[in-house]
């Protein structure tokens, strides 16, 4: 069984990889004048970016003392705001 620390590190790496891959998918469509996507596609990609970035806020603060309360509230606001996007 892997240790708790290694699972936290794995989660952090997966969050960062997901964020980078989402950006690599999203940015060419925004910056290119030859790529056309529907409004729904842009909305879905925005929701995925907000969702993945919300989990990236707590990287490095999952173990040890509790993270700041305001950071936790902001993260929860982003997590619950992502589905309606």
Image: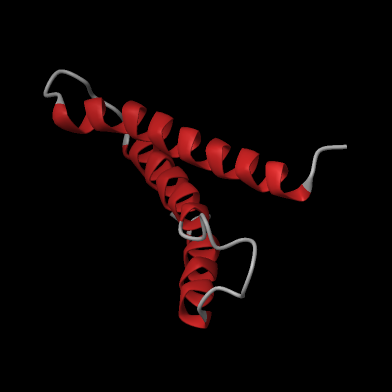
Where residue 66 sits in the image (x, y, percent)?
A: 61, 75
Q: How is the rendered protein coloured?
A: secondary structure
Where residue 63 sits in the image (x, y, percent)?
A: 64, 62
Residue at 15% from the left image edge and 30% from the top image edge:
31
Q: Residue furthest bottom?
A: 69
Residue at 47% from the left image edge and 57% from the top image edge:
54
- In the rendered view, would you say 33 is above or below 11? above
Q: Report the side of 22 relative to 31 (left or right).
A: right
Residue at 52% from the left image edge and 57% from the top image edge:
60
Residue at 50% from the left image edge and 78% from the top image edge:
68
Where residue 25 sits in the image (x, y, percent)?
A: 35, 27
- In the rendered view, would you say 29 is above or below 82? above
Where residue 42 sits in the image (x, y, percent)?
A: 34, 39
Q: Residue furthest left?
A: 33
Q: Is residue 27 visible?
A: yes
Q: Nearer the viewer, residue 74 or 60?
A: 60
Q: Nearer the viewer, residue 22 or 61?
A: 61
- Quadrant for the N terminus in the image: top right
- In the rendered view, would you say 63 is above or below 71? above
- Quadrant for the C terminus in the image: bottom left
Q: Residue furthest top?
A: 34
Give the tally of numbered discs.
0
- In the rendered view, would you say 76 is above or below 68? above
Occupied quadrant, residue 21 = top left
Q: Is residue 84 visible?
A: no
Q: Report the side of 32 relative to 36 (left or right).
A: left
Q: Nearer the viewer, residue 83 or 24?
A: 24
């Amino acid at each position: 069984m892997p240790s708790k620390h290694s699972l936290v590190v794995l989660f952090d790496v997966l969050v960062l990889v997901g964020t980078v891959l989402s950006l690599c998918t999203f940015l060419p469509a925004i910056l290119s004048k030859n790529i056309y996507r529907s409004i729904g596609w842009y909305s879905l990609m925005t929701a995925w970016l907000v969702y993945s970035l919300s989990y990236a806020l707590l990287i490095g603060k999952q173990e040890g003392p509790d993270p700041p309360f305001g950071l936790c509230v902001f993260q929860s606001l982003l997590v619950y705001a992502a589905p309606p996007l």
